[in-house]
Image: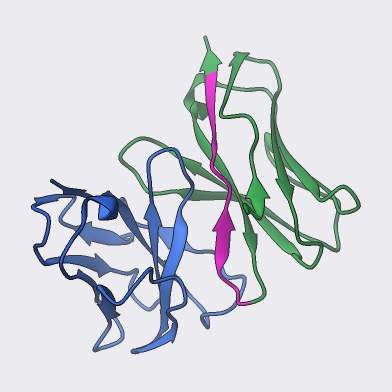
Chain colours: A blue, B green
Amino acid sequence: GAGVSQTPSNKVTEKGKYVELRCDPISGHTALYWYRQSLGQGPEFLIYFQGTGAADDSGLPNDRFFAVRPEGSVSTLKIQRTERGDSAVYLCASSQGVAGSTDTQYFGPGTRLTVL
Amino acid sequence: DQQVKQNSPSLSVQEGRISILNCDYTNSMFDYFLWYKKYPAEGPTFLISISSIKDKNEDGRFTVFLNKSAKHLSLHIVPSQPGDSAVYFCAVVDSSYKLIFGSGTRLLVRP
């Protein structure tokens, strides 16, 4: 079946602009996670959702970052007033069971964000 | 401070030989550990996991070993194949069930 998909695959923007990154999880997966991977590092947790609600947003670096999942499926990560330090690959993952479990997380290919 | 460390950024092995990738963690309360593999332009793919009640888990050519007293785990791939060339991430599940990743080890398997 279809895996996790993310759009766009690449996004180039200018400092100060607003961007939205989209994630389509595996159908039926109730838990959805966002991670950010900087060059030479492993993915770092940003936020996860159980259904429509943000169960844990402790990894969001500041209030310029926000994510929604209004219908419990697709999620959008929103970054306001982008900064060059936001440049990274943004990864989305979904898992089958309740968020907050050891269910395997399946990752999408990521969106590479470049802030000029 | 990094809670999960992969101290070898790269590893090169000959096809058919064993690859050993290492990972250290700092918190003795961690009790579930995973390895993910990542090819360029793709997301990480789950490879194998182990819980703290075991010290070994095997799946085909891949075996993960856990040494709780040393807070160390390792991934063994034998025999290594060129298609195994990728970046391997060690990860732990923290008390909030989030994944904490190491910085990765790039494995090159030479034909």
Q: Residue at x 63, y 29 (%)?
A: B8
The answer to whether one can see residue B92 in this image is: yes
Quadrant of residue B38 in the image? top left
Residue B107 lies, in percent from the top left, at: 54, 26
Location of residue A82 in the rendering, given as x and y in whole percent from the top left corner: 18, 61
In which quadrant of the rendered image does the N terminus of chain B lie? bottom right
Q: Which contiguous range is marked in magenta?
A: B96-108
The structure residue drawn at horizontal position 86% and vertical position 63%, both measured from the top left corner, is B53
Residue at point 24%, 76% (across, down): A74
Q: Quadrant of residue B16?
A: top right
Relative height, residue A98 to residue B64 (above, below): below
Q: In the displayed structure, would residue B52 be above or below residue B37? A: below
What's the residue at 30%, 77% (across, down)? A63
- Magenta-colored stretch includes residue B107: yes
- B33 sits left or right of B28 in the view: left
The total of numbered circles placed on residues is 0
Residue B41 percent location from the top left of the image: 30, 40
Above or below, B61 relative to A56:
above
- Can residue A30 be seen from the camera position used here? no
In the image, A83 versus A36, the foreground residue is A83
